[in-house]
């Protein structure tokens, strides 16, 4: 009976605490029945519209939902597992799916492959020997991953985190590696710096990295890399965008969320994104549908935190995490309609392709446009169109007989927007 009453109270809180179009779907001290106390979030990620996973610090609870946050199932408490901690500077967790999770802390890391029911401790011996404290972790799959730390040090593993090798170290004293993201198995970016922002780039799966100075004034706080021709990062106040895999960056917006500056951001494509800002008292979250130029914002006074979280699994749903609660955005229910992307409809047939691929899409306005196919490293392999596209349906054919098997991207740019779709060549 007690569990039933708690579940009913959880449902009431969910329904009563909707703020604008954001609805609370999780809170550690009232809506997750494994907890009975206030516990800060350590990390979170959502996959698709319904599945997601959250970890909390202090007690090491891992909670999984398969219902978009309506119901949660928690793992056993891990009271002595101190390596599951809230991030201090870098993004110290990686969620590959609801089962595979990593946390890093100094030169140690912990991992689970069963949604937090069992955890294993590993030590980055190379980091310990070099004296580099680890700040962030990122995995491409269950075996291949990266850790970043002081002095722009980058470490690589191919066995899930048991053993690590140093692949980059600049011996710089200006900050650490704070976040790592890959948009393909080959193309990756690492966000670094303290008073200046540096971007480390790789085009060979993280074996080799190059260092580019981007700007200065504020410490970098967020990195999003959804596709080769769209990368984003924030430096506390400003939002930056790159259309060439991090080679060049432009300022899109200057402090659009107000108080507290940017804390976390996540973009799904060239136009749709979410971001958070805040301080210990106030959490502000925003949604953009025009590439970050304008934002629809909401504020929660009770969820302020310097470390916040964002997850944007598809065009219909987005999530943000504050101090100890998670909110869900129903994008279709926004009172202010989102701006349409350049492509209203898209199909590639066949996909995977062995011969010729038929690329169909519909544009919502006439505009000068360019349609190009790129390889996995961002190099152009075929120019399909360069001119003015009239509003309506379009068909282009790409003859893939002359290219090697692998992953390619068809990119449509026009009207100040960029859309990219993946094509697989058999």
Image (cartoon, rainbow, N blue to C red):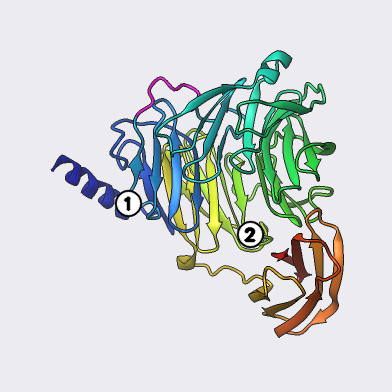
Is residue 139 rendered to the left or right of residue 209? Answer: left
**Image quarter (top left, top right, bottom left or bottom right) of the N terminus:** top left
Residue sitting at the far left: 1
Is residue 7 rendered to the left or right of residue 71? Answer: left
Instruction: Read off the residue under disc 1.
Output: 14
Q: What x and y, as percent, mark residue 63? A: 39, 40
Query: Can you tell which mark lies on residue 294?
Result: 2
Element marked by disc 1: helix
Q: What x and y, as percent, mark residue 321? A: 48, 43
| The residue stretch that appears in magenta | 77-83
Residue count near mark 2 (Cα–Cα under 10 Å), binned few <14, some 14–19, many ≥20: some
| Residue for point 61% across, 47% down | 265
Q: What x and y, as percent, mark residue 319? A: 49, 51
Is residue 62 rendered to the left or right of residue 15? Answer: right
| Residue for point 60% across, 35% down | 91
**Image quarter (top left, top right, bottom left or bottom right) of the C terminus:** bottom right
Name the one closer to the observer, 162 or 104.
162
Label 2, label 1: how far apart the Cα atoms are: 28 Å
Magenta span: predominant SS is loop
79 within the magenta span: yes
């Amino acid at each position: 009976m007690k569990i039933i009453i708690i579940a009913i109270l959880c449902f009431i809180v969910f329904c009563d605490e909707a703020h604008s179009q954001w609805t609370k779907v999780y809170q550690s001290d009232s809506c997750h029945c494994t907890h009975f106390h206030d516990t800060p979030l350590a990390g979170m990620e959502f996959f698709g519209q319904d599945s997601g996973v959250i970890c909390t610090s202090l007690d090491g609870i891992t909670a999984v939902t398969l219902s978009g946050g309506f119901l949660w199932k928690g793992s056993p408490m891990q009271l002595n597992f101190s390596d599951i901690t809230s991030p201090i500077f870098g993004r110290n967790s990686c969620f590959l799916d609801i089962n595979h999770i990593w946390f890093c802390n100094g030169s140690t890391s912990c991992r689970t492959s069963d949604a937090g029911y069992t955890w294993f401790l590993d030590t980055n011996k190379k980091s310990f020997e070099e004296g580099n404290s680890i700040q962030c972790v990122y995995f491409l799959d269950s075996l291949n991953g990266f850790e970043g730390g002081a002095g722009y040090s980058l470490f690589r593993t191919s066995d899930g985190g048991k053993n690590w090798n140093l692949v980059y170290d600049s011996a710089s004293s200006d900050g650490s590696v704070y976040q790592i993201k890959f948009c393909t198995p080959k193309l990756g970016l690492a966000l670094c710096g303290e008073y200046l922002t540096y971007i480390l780039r790789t085009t060979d799966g993280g074996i080799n990295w190059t260092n580019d100075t981007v700007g200065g004034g504020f410490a970098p706080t967020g990195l999003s890399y959804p596709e080769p021709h769209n990368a984003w990062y924030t430096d506390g106040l400003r939002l930056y965008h790159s259309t060439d895999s991090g080679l060049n960056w432009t300022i899109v917006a200057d402090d659009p969320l107000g108080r507290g500056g940017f804390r976390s951001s996540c973009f799904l494509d060239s136009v749709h994104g979410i971001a958070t800002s805040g301080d210990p008292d106030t959490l502000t979250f925003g949604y953009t549908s025009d590439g970050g130029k304008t934002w629809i914002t909401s504020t929660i006074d009770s969820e302020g935190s310097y470390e916040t979280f964002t997850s944007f699994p598809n065009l219909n749903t987005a999530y943000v995490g504050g101090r100890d609660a998670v909110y869900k955005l129903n994008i279709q229910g926004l009172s202010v309609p989102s701006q349409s992307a350049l492509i209203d409809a898209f199909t590639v047939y066949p996909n995977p392709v062995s011969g010729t691929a038929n690329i169909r899409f519909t544009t919502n306005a006439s505009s000068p446009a360019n349609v190009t196919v790129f390889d996995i490293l961002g190099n152009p392999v075929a120019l399909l169109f360069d001119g003015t596209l009239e509003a309506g349906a379009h068909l282009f054919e790409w003859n893939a007989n002359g290219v090697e098997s692998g992953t390619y991207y068809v990119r449509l740019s026009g009207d100040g927007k960029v859309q990219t779709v993946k094509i697989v060549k058999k």
